[in-house]
Amino acid sequence: EIMLTQSPDTLSLSPGERATLSCRASQSDSSSYLAWYQQKPGQAPRLLIYGASSRATGIPDRFSGSTSGTDFTLTISRLEPEDSAVYYCHHYGTSPRTFGQGTKLEIK
Amino acid sequence: QVQLVQSGAEVKKPGASVKVSCRTSGYTFTDYYIHWVRQAPGQGLEWMGWINPNSGGTMYALRFQGRVTMTRDTSISTAYMDLRRLRSDDTAVYYCARAWGGTSRGWFDPWGQGTLVTVSS
């Protein structure tokens, strides 16, 4: 089982700033079966990034994903108030599928 | 557009069963796997398993084996998740999600709106 550990647990930033969210996998995987989702209160998760760095349809280019070995990063440049949400990383390449515990992003 | 619409909220007593439906539209139902994920109140996301709507084949997370059954009805493009012997810690929002790419190893997009299952005596 590939365990995903996200950091930080909570991030508080101001509009216009840059957010860097991390997700570390417990073991290496030669493929980039890593996705990022955004979840707002009372809503289902929404796909942002798949394949570690490909943006989903309709997602603003302020959102970007990158990878280095077992470390995955979601970067949100130029934060907007509506970016306030919980962000989850997700490994979908092996069973069981796993999710990180989430990073709560607060916009001041 | 692609849509997954789930059945409404349920309240069940401990020991009972619940069956949640996920009605799909906007694409060929048998071309994409459906996964089920749950989220306890204030907690993170937990994967439960998948069903291949074409063959009916399934794979379940170890902790749910023996208690969960995933089925489908291709005539109405609907997937189902049946969870038995409910406990209070099964209280959660249950989501269905389509896996992209025609295999089980796809990212999840889109998701259903979620079904709240409350287990309480």
Image: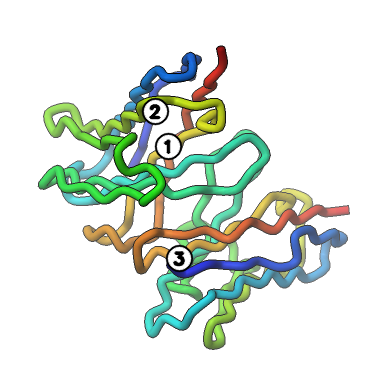
Q: Residue furthest bottom?
A: A69
Q: CA distance from mark 1 to mark 2?
A: 6 Å
Question: In terms of secondary structure, where does tag 1 sit?
Answer: loop
Question: Does residue B17 sit above or below A82 in this rendering?
Answer: above
Residue B55, position as x, y percentages in the image: 10, 47
Q: Residues within 10 Å of mark 2 (few under 14, many from 20)?
A: many
Q: Amino acid at mark 3?
A: His
- Report the colour scheme: rainbow
Chain hosting mark 2 = B
Residue lying at 65% horizontally and 56% vertically, measured from the top left: A102
A50 left or right of A43? Answer: left
Residues at discs 1 and 2 in contact (Cβ within 8 Å): yes
In the image, which disc is placed on residue A91?
Answer: 3
Q: Quick one: A16 or B107, which is closer to the camera?
A: B107
Residue A7, position as x, y percentages in the image: 71, 68
Q: Which residue is mark 1?
A: B112
Residue lying at 58% horizontally and 80% vertically, measured from the top left: A71
